[in-house]
Amino acid sequence: MDATSRVLLAGGMGAACAETTRLAMQWVVERYDAKGPLTELLSDLSQSDEVVPIGVLALLYSLRPPAHATVNLPPLGWAGATVVVGVLLGIATAALLARDLRTGESWGTILGTSLMTIGLAARLDLAAITAMFSLGATIAVGSRHQRDIQQMVSTTERAVMMPALVLAGARIDPSNIGRLGLLIPIALLLRFGAKFAVGFALRSSQPAAKGAPPLLGLGLVSSGGMTICIGLALALRFPGAVGDTVLATAVAVTLAGELAGPLALRRVLVSTGEIVEPAPISAPPDEEPEDHDELPPNEEHPSEGAPS
């Protein structure tokens, strides 16, 4: 491999291992009614850490600029162009949605600007995920209908993610990975180790995590759809050993996190008292026989019908 390919491989695997999905926190909160400062802290972290892999993705795309480009820009320039495309179209979308929000017209505007953003990113070989994130962030900042728009687009998440997961699974080609497959278990161990380190850092720096057990970091290993999308995006942009290895890493990280993360998270919140387990239902005590008054041994029962 040349130097650029090595950076793409290392950076792609790092981006695929960087996410903590918010769905694991939502599942624990909804199922076990978790409440407390540690739950709020972990929810905030899971909501915000997707910014890191999204930014890394734009930088990785910029390492190999488009061959047909007539403008020579440094890698940071191409990464900045990715953000600028999303911001400019986000401003246009916010301006078009400035009046009263009507569902039909708003869907047409959002879909139109989204397709334009994806088309420009694809034409320039830029990271469409980063451009779309910039588009959404600009709409959230510039539109007064932020909550309504968020409720509109949140209903499409599963409809988009399920085909992406199927495509990612069908796209994996083990024959292209070869000896690079040895890096996948190493990446898993490093991810678990990094999350443990994050857990210890939270316990020492955040008051809400002071009394949490050492398993706190292991509760952050769950990853989700963003990890798979990043792996798929890099596999499509850099086909071959680099892209397929990153995609296989993303799948392995997701499966391992799905097995370990929710269980560890539940134990952490139970130990801190933010999940109250129901008391075990005890079996009803055996009914004792009724206590009949017994006559003294020397006293006989009065005969039936005898006068009182």
Image (cartoon, rainbow, N blue to C red):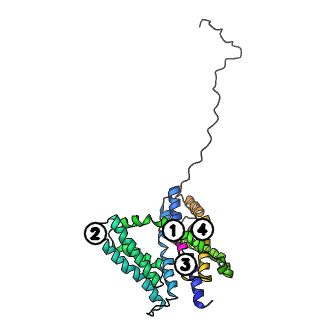
Q: Nearer the viewer, mark 4 or mark 1?
A: 1
- Label 2 sits on what residue type? Arg
**Mark 2 or mark 4, which is nearer to you?**
2
Can you identify the residue that label 4 sits on?
A: 257
Q: Quadrant of residue 268?
A: bottom right
Above or below — where is 113 with respect to 304? below
Sequence order check: which comes first, mark 1 or mark 2? 2
Q: Nearer the viewer, mark 2 or mark 3?
A: 2
Q: Which residue is mark 1?
A: 161
Q: Amino acid at mark 4?
A: Gly
Identify which residue, 9 or 239, lies in the foreground: 239
Q: Which residue is mark 2?
A: 99
Q: Is residue 196 visible?
A: no
Query: Whole-Å distance between the Cαs marked 2 and 3?
Result: 38 Å
* Quadrant in which the C terminus is drawn: top right
Q: Mark 3: which amino acid?
A: Ala
Q: Residue 278 vs residue 72: left or right? A: right
| Circle nearer the N terminus (4, 1) | 1
Query: Which of pointers 4 and 3 lies earlier in the amino acid sequence?
Result: 3
Q: Residue at x 45, y 84 (%)?
A: 123
Secondary structure at badge 2 equals: loop
User: Real-space Cα distance between discs 2 and 4?
Assistant: 43 Å
Whether 226 is among the magenta residues is: yes
- C-alpha separation, residue under disc 1 versus residue under disc 2: 31 Å
Which element is circle 3 on? helix
Out of 48 and 176, give the one closest to the viewer.
176
**Which of the marked residues, 3 or 1, is nearer the chain's N terminus?**
3
Instruction: Examine the rendered structure and indicate whether residue 154 appears above or below residue 81.
Output: above
Numbered range of the magenta stretch? 225-229
Rounded to the nearest whole Å, what is the CA distance between mark 4 and mark 1?
A: 18 Å
Is 304 within the magenta? no
User: Residue under circle 3?
Assistant: 15
